[in-house]
DNA sequence: TTTCAAATATGATCGCCGTCATGTTTTTGT
DNA sequence: ACAAAAACATGACGGCGATCATATTTGAAA
């Protein structure tokens, strides 16, 4: 049952999208190849026509999910607020792949770790542009530090069962970051 | 082959210690029950005399690993420096259980999530005491925010393959936190 | 000391999952 | 239009791992 080039490319995209959502929602190890294929509307047989192995799928999925759209004039405050919202916490399947997958990737192949490193670099660069600061070094320092806080807070908030504690972690981190971001608010010149 | 009450208690401790190190090093799902028992110097058979299931072991291991020693007069700067050191990054098996396991626990049983929540509360309280600030609310906000940054930075640094990027994440976060911690340095009154 | 059950060892079971083998259909290059 | 193979479906295989069954030893209570 052969299919069009175009259809095949679409199938590949569907597999990557399904894997991306499932991996974020349940973790890589908890998701089977057959489950991914089924979510993509296919059966497990065709999988090895698209990818060499499950590990290969993980690496390709990371590269696929971590593409960061260049954000001119990103509103950092709004970004942080949305990132640390209960809505984002409760929507891991559609949320930030870094927060959902970074911890696991430590145990994966070099290809996956390289893919995630690329995504990290883009993300840091993007945040550095948006971060207020006197010079480039200060901006980058603030970008990395607050990015780490965002990732950490989301991971911690998701780990916990107690909604009150989970909410507090999100809110305190957001309030703390808001104060830091406001440190040199309104800087519009780049350097 | 029965053993002493005392020996049995020691065996249980060995199992928990082995599980704690192995889980942190390789992740919960990548470690088999037999592997844990072997590391504890036993065989897989006796496992279910100590724990009801692997999930139960995970929950008990978290409670065992997350006991936080009360730290009077904690040197926050030194703590952050050690936490974000390459040495700690490269020693997951002996390092912070939260950074090693929190992300995974999201996919585990309520018992495990409750155990980790208890550990979080203790850790936040401990950091709140040590954090400088005008009032209790500011201290707690700073504690949660910087704790999230520490966890996040360690997780991100461990995920990455590129040593330069990994080092930078640790260093930038540490420098950033150092500046925040210094904001109201030398506060010794509590309220 | 004698008995009973506890603690662990050995071995088996059962299901899941990654991967491969093979069959079927149909696009694509000629 | 024809042939070749690409793309996917169905089905099978093999290993691993959680859990259980049973045997064995021996502490512990009487």
Image (cartoon, coloured by chain):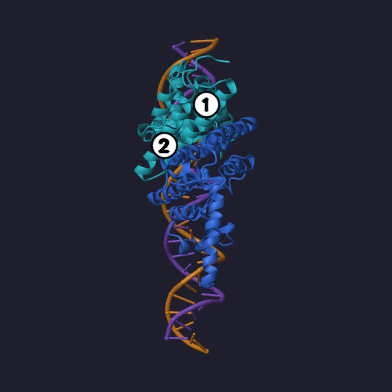
Chain colours: A blue, B cyan, C purple, D orange
Q: Quadrant of residue B96?
A: top left
Q: Quadrant of the C terminus of chain B?
A: top right
Q: Which dot marks residue A40?
A: none
Q: Can the viewer see residue B185 in this picture?
A: yes
Q: Secondary structure at mark 2?
A: helix
Lateral position of residue C8 relative to residue A180, left or right = left
Lateral position of residue A171 relative to residue B182, left or right = right
Percent from the top left, x then y, of residue D14? Answer: 42, 53
**Label 1, label 2: how far apart the Cα atoms are:** 32 Å
Taking C29 as reference, is B146 above or below it?
A: above
Q: Which dot marks residue B172?
A: 2
The front one of A65 and A103 is A65
Percent from the top left, x then y, of residue A190? Answer: 46, 47
Chain letter for mark 1: B
Q: Is the C-beta separation of discs 1 and 2 under 8 Å?
A: no
Chain letter for mark 2: B
Lateral position of residue A86 relative to residue B98, left or right = right
Percent from the top left, x then y, of residue B42? Answer: 41, 30
Q: Which dot marks residue B63?
A: 1
User: Which mark sits nearer the N-terminus, 1 or 2?
Assistant: 1
Count of numbered circles in the view: 2
Taking A114 as reference, is B135 above or below it?
A: above
Taking B174 as reference, is A63 above or below it?
A: below
Q: Quadrant of the N terminus of chain B?
A: top left
Near mark 2 (Cα within 10 A), the count class, few <14, some 14-19 or many ≥20, is many
Q: Mark 1 or mark 2: which is in front?
A: 2
Q: Secondary structure at mark 1?
A: helix
The front one of B16 and A27 is A27
């Amino acid at each position: 049952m052969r299919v069009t080039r175009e259809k095949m490319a679409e199938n590949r995209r569907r597999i990557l999208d399904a894997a991306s959502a499932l991996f974020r929602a349940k973790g890589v190890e908890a998701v089977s190849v057959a489950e991914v294929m089924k979510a993509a509307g296919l059966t497990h047989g065709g999988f090895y026509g698209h990818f060499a192995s499950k590990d290969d799928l993980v690496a390709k999925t990371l590269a696929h999910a971590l593409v960061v759209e260049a954000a001119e004039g990103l509103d950092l405050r709004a970004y942080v607020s949305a990132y640390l919202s209960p809505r984002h916490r409760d929507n891991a399947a559609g949320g930030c792949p870094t927060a959902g997958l970074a911890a696991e990737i430590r145990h994966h192949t070099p290809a996956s770790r390289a893919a995630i490193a690329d995504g990290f670099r883009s993300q840091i660069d993007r945040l550095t542009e948006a971060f207020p600061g006197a010079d480039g070094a200060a901006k980058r320092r603030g970008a990395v530090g607050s990015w780490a806080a965002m990732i950490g807070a989301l991971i911690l908030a998701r780990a916990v069962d107690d909604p009150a504690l989970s909410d507090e972690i999100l809110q305190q981190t957001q309030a703390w970051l808001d104060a830091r971001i406001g440190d040199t608010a309104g800087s519009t010149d780049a350097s």
